[in-house]
Amino acid sequence: MEHLELNAVIGFAGSVINGIILLPDRKSMVFALGSTIVKRDIVNPTDQQFLQGHSDRVTCMSLSPSGKYLASGQVTHLGFQADVIVWDMESLEIVHRLRLHKVRVEAVSFSCNDKWLASIGGEDDNSLVVWNLETGKAVCGSPAANDVCHTVKWARHNEFIIITAGKGSLRVWDFDLANRKVRPSDCNLGKLQRTINYVFVDDTDEFCYAGTASGDILKVNMRSRLFRHLGPKTRMSQGVVCIEMTPHGEIIAGAGDGTISVLHPESLKVLNSTKLDGGGITCIAPHTSGQLFFAATSQCSTFVVKYEGLATELRSTCHSTKIHDVVYPAGYSELFATSSKQDIRVWNARTCAELLRVQIPNLDCDCICFSRDGRAILSGWSDGKIRAFGPQSGKLLYVINDAHVGGVTAIACANDPERLVSGGFDGSVRVWRVTAESRVMLGSMKEHKATVNCIKVRGNDMEFVTASSDGSCIIWDMRRFVRNNSLFASTFFKAVLYHPDESQLLTTGTDRKITNWDAYDGSAIRIVDGSTSAEVNTLDIAGSGEFFVSGGGDKVVKLWHYDEGQTQAIGIGHSGAITKVVVSPDQRNIVSVGDEGAILIWNIPERLRDA
């Protein structure tokens, strides 16, 4: 089977601590995205490779000191074992798959000579395991602490000393290879009770700096295991999440409120600080040039920050939660819009840069479409309102209040710029006349018994079709607002579309079938299996009608020949269920969006482009 060529990926898992790693070759970086790990060129975002092997979300990553290996841990379902995968960074192949921890791997760390790997399990497991990287076997293990453990670090120059830290504990372990044991000794913190999020070991192995959930940093002598100092005096808001060292030997710390602070290594006084937008700092990745570092936030923005004066520059942004919808404007392929929780974003399709962001806190935007003339972005929200925004300014143009009870789940524009069709969570379908002065409801049809998932309007504005979770698609008369025809199947219909010549309809849903129907009498013409394993969520057809695209719970984008009903090519790259796919108007690209918040842009094969 031919594979679709991936053009670009917009996405990054901001929740992974130290989720961006700059590789020693100075050219490329590694980051997690859902269950995949992406290696890509720092300058050119289209030059990328995928490391696929995890079955669920990646939770932690670490690069070996030599840069030869990368270790990554994942989360899995309760009662199952979570893998640690060791990758060879030259060949990008899996070297070892290490399976012992239950449910979640919290942190991983390599020894200074690349011989050993230490890993910590999540709260259901909470054990420290040391692995031999030559054989891929566990050498020894031990319960990590009495309470939850958050992080593990190996000493910089000694391959037999490990540090773990978590809720109320900071432990230095002696790794006894001869007897295959790890022996802990607790650091004496006096009366201090802290939950430690992160540990940084200095270059001499003399001190370690522990960042706490209370927002201060503990300086602890690793040789005597005694607490030395606590700072800064005014604590960092929402805790210290990550710590690094500047080339001049100062401590740099990222906090949960987005603040980056430079601290003196002895007194732990704040020398300089800056605040970034977009959630807490989850990653500080120093660049080998010694001039700057990359910072990432929990809401998936990345910044380049200079050490000198902490001057910041936004580098990339993306969605941090499930994306509900993606659309192109009619006949224009240079940009597209996506909608997710709280926001709508407009992207440049060529450079992958974010052009506009519209945010409404605490609401979900379930569906969007561009008006036919491109003068408005129309969106349906979970509070039952339809909102229209300017496509360049992002300014709110108008609101239709109480459009649907329970939320607006589908929206479509007619060719007449004044007509708008919407569907709701309650199954009602409504047609609106929208002018600059007023928004009037022309008709309301309540025949669906469940959520309306998709609406498509015919080219002549005489009819439109709605797909619903009640197992029916209804073709409506747009002038009389009555049912012309209906299609039934034992499925939740997720998507429906007209073939460009409007002689046939194409539907799909939770029964995994893609069905062609006669648009005139509503009889089924052909049924093909859209997937063998999971529901199909979305369909889109090319303007020529030669091919169509599907995507769903099996995480694969499939390109089908319309007349033959055969899969022509598949695209593998998503690590969550695909929620929407769309073909660009110029038939060069497919854009797919998924549960994990990733936007993938695929190239359509040459032979199909000019069809």
Image: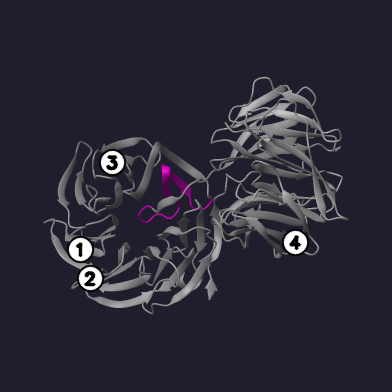
- Identified by mark 2, the residue type is Ala
Mark closer to the chain start, 3 or 4: 4
Circles 2 and 1: CB distance less than 8 Å? yes
Q: Residue at x 24, y 64 (%)?
A: 472
- Identified by mark 3, the residue type is Lys
Location of residue 294 in the rendering, given as x and y in whole percent from the top left corner: 66, 40
Q: SS class of the residue under badge 3?
A: loop
Q: SS class of the residue under badge 4?
A: loop
Q: Which mark is residue 519?
A: 2
Location of residue 283 in the rendering, given as x and y in whole percent from the top left corner: 65, 41
Q: SS class of the residue under badge 1?
A: strand
Query: Quick check: 390 above or below 335?
Result: above
Label the magenta part by its dominant secondary structure. Answer: strand
* Colouring chosen for the image of the structure: one colour
Q: CA distance from mark 2 to mark 1?
A: 9 Å
In front: label 4 or label 2: 4
Q: Which mark is residue 385?
A: 3
The reply to whether the magenta stretch includes residue 316 is no
Location of residue 327 in the rendering, given as x and y in whole percent from the top left corner: 39, 53
- Which residues fall within the magenta stretch? 329-351
Mark closer to the chain start, 1 or 3: 3
Would you identify the image quadrant in which residue 85 lies? bottom right
In front: label 2 or label 3: 3
Write down the residue under mark 4: 90
Would you identify the image quadrant in which residue 402 lies? top left
Q: SS class of the residue under badge 2?
A: loop
Write down the residue under mark 1: 475
- Identified by mark 4, the residue type is Glu
Mark closer to the chain start, 4 or 1: 4
Towards the viewer: 285 or 225:
225
Lateral position of residue 412 relative to residue 180, left or right: left
